[in-house]
Image (cartoon, rainbow, N blue to C red):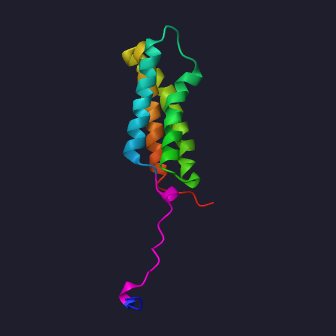
Amino acid sequence: MLNDPDARDEPAPPESDPRDEPAPFGTVVALTAASAVAVMVLAALLSHPPNLKFLLFGPIVLVVFEVAVHEVWWKRWWGAIPGAVIGLAAYFEGRAALADIVGDGWAHPLAYVTAWALFAVVFAWCSRYPRRF
C-alpha cells in the first residue's frame, strides 16, 4: 500500500488568514452597547460624577478585546475613525436634543449608550471593507 496512488499525502489547502475576517457585527454591537449600559449603571451608583477616563474605559476595552480575540486585521480597523466621529456627533447633538425631551437626568445616559452603539455599528460595518494600502 506504500505505492497506492489513492493514498498519497496531499498538502492541505491553504486556509485564509483569520485576521482578514470582518468583525462579528452582532457581537461587537451588542457587547459594546451592553458595556456602555454597564458603565452608565456604575456611574449612577457612584456618589460623585465619574471622570472622562471612566466613561471611555468600558467600551474601548471591549472593542480592543474583540479585535484581539477575533484577530481583526489592522486594515479593517479603519472604521474606528468614522465610527468615533459619528458616535461623538450623536452624543453631543443627541444629548442636547434629548435634554429638551426627557430632561438632563436621562439625556446623558441615553446619548452615551446610543453613541457607543453607533460607533460599534459603523466600526463593524466598515470592517467588511478592508482598506487597500
Residue lying furthest front in this view? Answer: 1
Horizontal arrangement in the rendering, residue 129 relative to residue 31 (left or right): right
The residue at the point 39 percent across, 90 percent down is 5
26 vs 95: above or below: below
Horizontal arrangement in the rendering, residue 26 relative to residue 91 (left or right): left
The residue at the point 53 percent across, 34 percent down is 60
Q: Main secondary structure of the magenta part?
A: loop
The residue at the point 52 percent across, 32 percent down is 89
Residue lying furthest top in this view? Answer: 47
On-image quarter of the N terminus = bottom left
Q: Is 18 a magenta residue?
A: yes
3 vs 118: above or below: below
Q: Residue 31 location, x and y as percent?
A: 41, 36
The residue at the point 46 percent across, 40 percent down is 120
Residue range highlighted in magenta:
6-22
Q: Residue 116 location, x and y as percent?
A: 46, 33
27 vs 42: above or below: below
Residue lying furthest right in this view? Answer: 133
Of 89 and 30, the residue lying toward us: 30
Q: Is residue 97 visible?
A: no
Quarter residue 105 falls in: top left
Quarter residue 118 falls in: top left
Q: Is 25 a magenta residue?
A: no
On-image quarter of the C terminus = bottom right
Q: Is residue 10 visible?
A: yes
Of 69 and 59, the residue lying toward us: 69
The tally of labels here is 0
